[in-house]
Amino acid sequence: MGDAILCTPALRAIRHRFKNSRICFFARPAVREILSPGDFNDEWLEQTGSDPFAIAKKLKDKRFTQAILFKNSFASALAVFVARIPFRLGYAREGRGLFLTEKLYPPKLANGRFKPVSMLDYYLAIASWLGCDTDDRSLELRTEADDENSLLAVLPALAKADGPVAVFVPGGAFGPSKCWMSERFAQTADRLIDKYNATVVVSVASNRFEQQIAGEICDRSRHKLINLALTPLSLGQLKALFAMADLVVTNDTGPRHIAIAMGRKVVTLFGPNDPAWTDTGCENEIKIVGRAACSPCRKPLCSEKEHLCMEAITVEMVCAAAERLLEDEHTELGPAVKKGFVEVSQSLYVDADFRDYFEQAGLDGIDAVFSFEHSTDITRSTLARYRRILRLELDEAPAMFYLKRYDRPPVLAQLRNRLSHGKRISCAGCDFEPDLKLARLGINTPRTVAYGEEWGKFFEKRSFIVTEEIPDAESLEKQLPGCFEQPTTTRSLAQRRCFIDELAKFAAKFHRSGFRHRDFYLCHIFYDMAGGFYLIDLARVFKPQLFSERFRLKDIAQLDYSAPKRHFSNADRLRFYLRYADKDKLTVTDKLFIRKVIKKAKRMARHDKKHGRPVPFET
């Protein structure tokens, strides 16, 4: 499982490089479950056995032209060779180089042993060989709405948690040498509960060894812990659990990578293994390495009389790391800022491509940004008084910009932001962070060119974000493609259907990311002359930990409500939904969902009529 997750940056890079190719994954069911849902591939082939000749027959029937091997086994290379796939790329090790047409060689030390290199970079090297952009090293996993909902049904205590949710992972498939002592996990749980009123979940695999560990921890704790040995979860539900966690304390094992991929705060305990092999560069992870003369030995069973490396890790060390992560609620800007941004002054970051334009305009500090008035104020009367929106035209800059400023936002507004995002975050950060994440997923958003924030001891003082105007684009509320205004002909009808299909795919891709918008109207979707869709007003975007399906329904109802009746018939709306759901016909569940959408849209219409506003989907 850990290797599959460490592959995700390479899988994403390959998908972006070969957008028009059909990509199939061949893997065991557990790998499919951990990587789904996702858009890295078009098809799955399930591995049910280990016979390379049986695997070769299955691959040969598909007539693949290229095979990329992430697995280092001899059998995997033999299978693609016997299947006569013309292009076979992988690492030449384990005596399998003869079967590969394109070979990579892992780095070695002078003594002939493999050099400790993060497996993340090891896999990215394969993508780089293929000409992919490998700058993005972030792990990526997604959850299903059904798994989120069923998790709360299985573990209702999570919905009632008053303090942070802490997940402990005390096992490890590698072997017992990686495992920290049960009594120390129990003591750590007691301290977190005493100090933070934490809800502690002990997560283990469904084998006797790990179930015994979970039982020991729960028996030795003074408090009631949630023991997943007694309430096993599916891999989908496990991902949903980690997505909800405020803290994960784990041995160096597969679920650690789930937590990192979900952006959680993680304390990882290392003993017999060198952390370099699985380094991800995660800024929210604290690694605690048990130092001993015999480590790192890389042995699954400790051969010493005492388990020196893991015993060197004390409860005090783990609790101090946990407290540091839990109490440092605000993530500093530096680690979050994507590559290409430079810090021009304290807590003010500018895209390197635009730095000169900002410096020429005197925008070299937060004070300068908030006093800058050489712009057009386009603040709407409906905006809160602490928000201003300005349109900037900087000398010689290739585009126009929009500046959003937040000055002394009310505490209540800041608390709402914390509730939505699960952490302390500035008002501008609510715009900036979704931009980073959505752009990484291939969802078009306005390009952020500058960002800054200033904090008091507990609350935000002020923050801002500058985005580039989307070139040659207009909101769908103001302007639909010309085919909607033209007389209905075979050609214009085909163009309209194509547009509806692409809009549905855009909405589906956004929702598959786990994010929701809360104002998913046509006015917040831009369409450019090249046929691309862009999502704006990202301050409304968030990833709900609860009620994800409810917010998805709300988004679709808002989109349906804002689509003018004169342009979108009921048949168009049905076509949209079928493409959105990627189905040929409606199921009972689909029909129920559509009825809820219509009901909500009608409720919105009654509200607008009451206040004398026009109703788009009735116009």
Image (cartoon, rainbow, N blue to C red):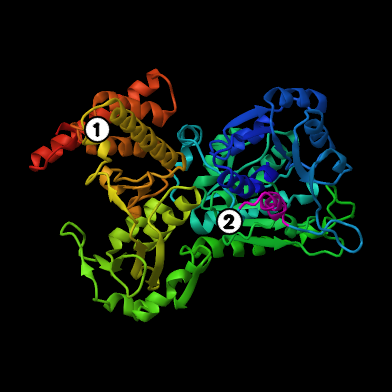
- The one nearer the camera, 216 or 340, is 340
Whole-percent x, y for residue 42 in the image: 57, 33
Q: Furthest residue to the right?
A: 111
- The one nearer the camera, 235 or 584, is 584
Question: For mark 1, what is the residue?
Answer: 600
| Badge nearest the viewer, 2 or 1 | 2
Residue type at mark 2?
Asp
Q: Quadrant of residue 56?
A: top right
Whole-percent x, y for residue 162 in the image: 43, 50
Where 331 sits versus 66, above or below? Answer: below
User: What's the mark number on residue 165?
Assistant: none
- Magenta stretch in the rendered image: 118-132
Residue type at mark 1?
Lys
Membership of 270 in magenta stretch: no
Q: Quadrant of residue 20?
A: top right
Answer few, some or many: residues within 10 Å of disc 1's Cα (few below 14, many 20 plus, some between 14 and 19).
some
Membership of 123 in magenta stretch: yes
SS label for mark 1: helix
Answer few, some or many: residues within 10 Å of disc 2's Cα (few below 14, many 20 plus, some between 14 and 19).
some
SS label for mark 2: loop
User: What's the mark number on residue 136?
Assistant: 2
- Is residue 311 rendered to the left or right of residue 1? right
Where 380 sits versus 490, above or below? Answer: below
